[in-house]
Image (cartoon, coloured by chain):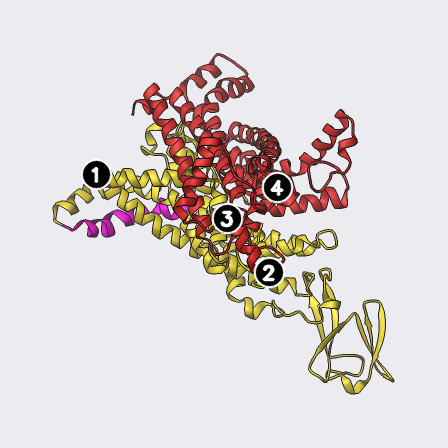
């Protein structure tokens, strides 16, 4: 069998492929979506159509559209079958008449929701929201987390103690309650959702940054840079942060999936992305009202959501395995000497690979910050 | 040790107070109040009357002191704006339902999590281990609310095995004791399984990691060398040592468990604290919201405390620090 590409492990290739597909879907949504994600063309007829439905689209001379299960050209004009009834339209009223029927049709690959909107199109637009919220909020968490972690590591014991107590208090806050209270406070919407998620998920990153920086500070190259008279900020920026970034970025990747889950949960509860913007969470909330009539409006957005979260979590998992030797396999985990003074925080994956014996409360608290929704 | 205990308790109390004060201030900062979110617009004179009766027209510090005084001195949580009955009654009615759901979910979480984790650790590096790793990834990547809806669709709508929502059937009050309990159990299955399974993935990974760490130690090699069966080595010698971090995780995963309970209660219309909290948010019922946040904070901080004390009990370095 010919070997393909560089020796990336298969799960890593998979997750990268999935994420590439997701990004492509999000970027290309306006081009790839078969229909407008907001349009409710003749909702009476198009509502809750199962996946694979094809409807004839009749363009009336007045500019309106009408959908029908079947459209047939007859001597008297156009015969439509709509919702079990039949009606006859005079040929002069129809703009897209052909010799046998009408020229246009609508194909609902994944069916429609109760407002007659095309689910496939909404799903593609939903990918944009979930990706944008996930990436932007993690970027915000990363910025705050690295800033706070650096301050704690370099700002002296007093500031360190204060900041770490604040982090502990925030970690002890009933998490969803905090997010919900904040969402109720701010006017719900896309920007507010990103802000809330970013502002409430930097704690693990700040802890990790602090631990990494403290470990690096005693290393020869840092001591040398200081001895050469480089200002503290330059040491931080040029020497400390670049060397501390690997585990921090891995942790951030692991959080993207969790943040996407939180976004969808908030939107499901009506406190996140607001309609008519298609978020997967709010699509599922809509679908809940018609759950016993139609499975597809709930099933597809949820499947897309789960697949997305799986892809991000898999990527984070694999990156951690590949880049962070402390997490690699049992042989290292079995040797306590190989562990850093403060075991790496596990974040969304729970305590993945290794970790010490009885965890210090710090690491265990982070390990407990699991992806709930 | 007494000094350590005292410090920990004081810190825990401080934390609960901080959470409550933050919530109080946040709630008062929100534009609008309980009278502005009602479905029917309330006429202005009545609205002003209500605002006065609720005490919402007083300055914020005075409201805060009055509320804190009532809670701290008399255990009086106030009156629900929405339900017009004591908050204490509202919370007392909902708490048992939440505790029942949380306990059942924990049972599923740790039952499934331990089984998967031990199986993976015993066969670490094999195809078994890898499949379990994939399974846990799938489990912890699931949105609970969606999993719940799909479970309702399958087990309740299509198969008709289990009820889709609520805690009791209509007319359960007339049932005999046993029948009523069976009815409750049936209603419990879907929410508890959904929540427990969604959380089991992370628990399984934690158990696997904890056990693998222990299985590399010398005394395990000794136990094997003595000729003990592998089953005995893993379950008795290995798990006993791995249990400490697992119990700790149990205590520390309460925040995520509570979040899950809230979602699960909303999806399954389970009449617990999560549901009450959600309704209170929607109705801006701040006395109820403060009380439920307080209960959640006490549960979280309390379980963190227990986990820390447990840790201190096994590791003297912590309490002497």
According to the picture, the residue beneath numbered tag 4 turns out to be B265
Q: Mark 3 falls on what kind of element?
A: helix
Report the chain holding disc 4.
B
Inter-mark Cα distance, 4 to 1: 50 Å
State which tag comes first along the sequence, 2 or 1.
2
Q: CA distance from mark 2 to mark 1?
A: 51 Å
Does B45 lie within the magenta span?
no
Looking at the image, which is closer to me, B282 or A274?
B282
Measured Cα–Cα span from mark 3 to mark 1: 42 Å
First reached walking from the N terminus: tag 3 or tag 1: 3
Q: Nearer the viewer, mark 2 or mark 1?
A: 2
**Quarter residue A119 falls in:** bottom right
The chain coloured red in the image: B
* Residue pointed to by mark 1: A218
Q: Position of residue A237 (x, y in %)?
A: 24, 52
In the rendered image, residues at marks 4 and 2 fall on the same chain: no
């Amino acid at each position: 069998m010919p070997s393909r590409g560089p020796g990336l492990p298969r799960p890593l290739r998979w997750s990268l492929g999935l994420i590439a597909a997701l990004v492509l879907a999000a970027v290309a949504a306006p081009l790839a979506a078969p229909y407008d994600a907001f349009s409710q063309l003749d909702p009476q007829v198009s509502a809750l159509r199962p996946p694979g439905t094809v409807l004839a689209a009749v363009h009336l001379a007045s500019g309106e559209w009408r959908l029908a299960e079947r459209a047939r050209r007859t001597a008297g004009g156009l015969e439509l079958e709509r919702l079990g009834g039949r009606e006859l339209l005079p040929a002069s009223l129809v703009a897209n008449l052909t010799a046998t029927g009408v020229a246009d049709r609508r194909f609902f690959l994944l069916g429609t929701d109760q407002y007659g909107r095309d689910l496939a199109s909404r799903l593609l637009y939903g990918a944009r929201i979930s990706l944008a919220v996930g990436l932007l909020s993690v970027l915000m968490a990363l910025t705050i987390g690295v800033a706070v972690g650096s301050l704690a590591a370099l700002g002296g014991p007093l500031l360190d103690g204060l900041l770490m107590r604040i982090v502990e208090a925030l970690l002890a806050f009933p998490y969803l309650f905090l997010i919900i209270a904040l969402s109720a406070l701010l006017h719900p919407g896309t920007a507010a959702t990103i802000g809330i998620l970013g502002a409430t998920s930097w704690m693990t990153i700040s802890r990790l940054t602090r631990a990494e920086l403290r470990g690096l500070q005693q290393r020869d190259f840092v001591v040398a840079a200081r001895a050469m008279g480089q200002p503290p900020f330059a040491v931080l920026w040029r020497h400390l942060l670049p060397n501390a970034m690997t585990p921090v970025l891995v942790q951030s990747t692991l959080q993207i999936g969790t943040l996407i889950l939180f976004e969808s949960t908030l939107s499901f509860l009506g406190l996140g992305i607001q309609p008519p913007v298609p978020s997967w969470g709010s699509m599922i909330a809509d679908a809940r009202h018609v759950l016993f009539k139609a499975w597809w409006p709930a099933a597809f957005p949820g499947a897309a959501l789960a697949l997305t979260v799986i892809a991000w979590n898999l990527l984070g998992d694999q990156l951690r395995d590949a880049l962070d030797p402390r997490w690699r396999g049992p042989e290292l985990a079995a040797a306590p000497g190989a562990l850093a003074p403060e075991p790496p925080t596990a974040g969304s994956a729970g305590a993945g690979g290794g970790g010490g014996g009885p965890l210090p409360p710090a690491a265990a608290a982070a390990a407990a910050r699991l992806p709930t929704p | 040790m007494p000094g350590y205990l005292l410090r920990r308790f004081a810190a825990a109390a401080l934390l609960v107070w901080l959470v409550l004060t933050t919530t109080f201030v946040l709630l008062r900062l929100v534009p609008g109040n309980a009278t502005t979110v009602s479905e029917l617009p309330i006429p202005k004179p009545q609205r002003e009357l209500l605002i006065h009766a609720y005490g919402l027209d007083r300055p914020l510090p005075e409201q805060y002191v009055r509320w804190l005084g009532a809670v701290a001195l008399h255990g009086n949580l106030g009156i629900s704006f929405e339900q017009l009955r004591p908050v204490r009654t509202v919370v007392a009615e909902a708490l048992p339902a939440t505790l029942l759901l949380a306990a059942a979910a924990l049972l599923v979480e740790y039952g499934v999590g331990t089984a998967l984790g031990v199986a993976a650790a015993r066969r670490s590096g094999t195809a078994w281990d890898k499949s379990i790793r994939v399974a846990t990834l799938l489990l912890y990547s699931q949105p609970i609310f969606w999993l719940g809806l799909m479970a309702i669709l399958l087990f309740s709508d299509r198969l008709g095995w289990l009820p889709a929502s609520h805690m009791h059937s209509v007319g359960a009050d007339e049932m005999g004791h046993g029948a009523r309990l069976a009815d409750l159990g049936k209603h419990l299955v879907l929410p508890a399984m959904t929540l427990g399974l969604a959380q089991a993935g992370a628990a399984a990974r934690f158990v696997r990691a904890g056990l693998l760490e222990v299985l590399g130690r010398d005394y395990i090699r000794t136990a094997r060398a003595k000729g003990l069966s592998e089953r005995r080595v893993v379950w008795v010698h290995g798990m006993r040592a791995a249990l400490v971090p697992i119990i700790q995780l149990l205590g520390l995963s309460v925040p995520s468990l509570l979040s899950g309970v809230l979602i699960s209660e909303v999806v399954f219309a389970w009449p617990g604290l999560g549901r009450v909290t959600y309704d209170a948010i929607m109705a801006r019922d701040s006395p109820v919201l403060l009380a439920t946040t307080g209960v959640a904070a006490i549960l979280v901080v309390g379980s963190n405390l227990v986990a820390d004390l447990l840790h201190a009990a096994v590791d003297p370095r912590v309490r002497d620090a």
